Image (cartoon, grey):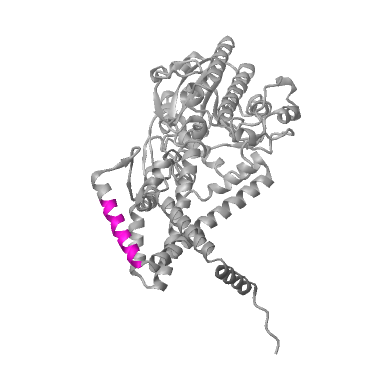
Amino acid sequence: MSRSIPRPWKALAARVRRWRQAHPTATRALSLTLTTLAAVFVLAALVLPNRVVGLGPATFLRIPGEAVIGAAVLLALPRRARAAVAAVGGVALGAMTVLNLLDMGFDQYLGRDFNVILDWELFGDAESYLEDSLGRTTTLAAVAGVLVLVALLLILPALSLVRLGNALARHTGTATRGTLIAGVVWITCTSLGLQVAGVPLAADRTASALKVQARRVSDTLRDEAEFRKVARVDAFGNTPGSQLVPELRGKDVIFTFIESYGRSAIEDPIMAPGVDSTLDVRTKALAKAGFHAKSGWLTSATYGGSSWLGHSTTMSGLWISNQQRYRTVMASDHLSLTEAFRRTGDFDTVGVMPGVQKGWPEQQWYGLDKVYNAFQLGYQGPKFSWSTMPDQYALQQYQERVHSKRPADGRSRMSLLILTSSHQPWAPIPKMVDWDRLGDGSVFKGIEAAGDKPADVIADTSKSRAEYGKSIQYSVTALTEWLERYGTDDTVLVFLGDHQPIARVSGNHASRDVPVSLVAKDPKILDKITDWNWTDGLRPAHDAPVWKMNTFRDRFLTAYGSTPHPRKG
């Protein structure tokens, strides 16, 4: 009878046994190294912070109380139970590590922690952003790398804890004494508040993080129910159209959001000189054309991204700080500032959204009769990373398709524009061209090709900050040149930022403030907001009033003669 061929894994196991028998010293050294690495890995995971600023040598020199408790539990369990508990505990530790890393990333890019209930859908947006900025191949490689990293972070802690559990069982006496000593040291450090470089020696980081995550989930679920009640209350919910914005009848009102236009652009020492110079130059140019401006600050409901939260907060008068709140409002009949104009019956309402590349059901809530998306503006030029077209082109198309044409029924017009050229990664950045040469946008092909590559800017913090400032200068210049060129005696322009840029650009401790400006030729329009105490010109003073973004709707409606008729839910 012929001998059966061993399976590959059996053959590999046999070779490993033979090698261990032939090299006992190397085997012991390798085993000790693997056990040491497993211990270091587990200890590092247990004390890992959820903030980039918390990373440092002192952080990883702490004694985690969870390690002491875990060792005691593993020592007390029989072999099979010990292996099962170690494996499950390792996977749980890996999951907490993933959440800590997500918190770090979200804090750097969005100025907040990751929400395990609401934020999963943002990964699709992140993938689209990477593809637009870095290309399909790089994005696929990055996604594959992230998936491999997550798998390793779930598997390696489990393998490490199983190995450590077996090591404890082989040396029960020594392990028991060591665990008791570690427990006494941890209690002593906690009681005395002993620290190294300002960091407490005793740690319970993972247990605390688990409690925070549980509380975050509970708060999210509770917030969803409470916010539904809040959204039903509306100071102008029952106001008839005849009593909404009567002081703006006959005006051409334009609300414009400039992507990532934050306070840092005006006050950060790297970006501010160029941006402030541009704002001052454009203020003078507008004044020469007969336009005057007042500016202040609004505190955005979002930071670094999720621009739609800033847009909807401004327009709804509600604090829309997460995706669940956004969905709740979009499904409600809560009055938006833009819908208020349509409700009057005296305004045609139009949106120009070069960043919208798919269906946009929010059009109904915003009260827009017509919306032009990225594919409806005739652009034949190149994309500038995420931005589908330069702001100057979008504004020229707005002029040709909307602003230059009075509604056939003689109504006034309210427009909502969302400009995108200052969206990260701020490379390449468009340049201003002669307005008469814009055509179908092909003129931008050479400008895009000669610009910086996104990968070069993303990898360089100093360059990111500098290029961000240039992108804001471009967007402000494009918007105000359009106003100077095409604005009329009836034009009323309100423009503002939706949020600050990411922390890598604005800084880890930056505010959430954004500039807001109101520009008009008619002095009566600016007189209506005299009591706002805003700064003259396009650049708000450092000590100009700061309001929460959700207060803008009601202040604006009130300033221009709207009468509150509350709906109380």
* Rendered image quadrant of residue 546: top left
Question: Residue 117: in sight, yes or no?
Answer: no
Task: Tell me where the magenta segment starts and ends, as one range.
Answer: 172-187
Q: Is residue 413 above or below residue 323?
A: above
Q: Quadrant of residue 372?
A: top right
Most common secondary structure along the magenta stretch? helix
In the displayed structure, 359 sits above or below 250; it is below
Point 35% across, 53% down: residue: 207
> Which quadrant holds the N terminus?
bottom right
The x and y percentages for residue 341 are: 51, 31
Picture mark count: 0
* Left or right of 179 in this view: 462: right
- Residue at 35% over, 67% down: 172
Q: Position of residue 287 (x, y in %)?
A: 55, 11
Residue 271 in view of the camera: yes
Q: 197 left or right of 36?
A: left
Q: Position of residue 376 (x, y in %)?
A: 69, 37
Please state the horizontal and vertical placement of residue 443, each as a whole percent of the image. Answer: 75, 27
Q: Residue furthest bottom?
A: 1
**Magenta highlight on residue 195:** no
| Residue found at the far top of this picture | 288
Report the side of 151 relative to 112 (left or right): right
Position above or below: 480 against 451:
above
- Vertical order, 285 against 111 (above or below): above
Residue placed at 28% from the left, 43% from the top?
194
Q: Is residue 179 found inside the magenta-colored segment of the image?
A: yes
Quarter holding residue 131: top right
The front one of 220 and 237 is 220
Q: Is residue 389 left or right of residue 524?
A: right
Q: Quadrant of the C terminus?
A: top left
Q: Nearer the viewer, residue 122 or 552?
A: 122
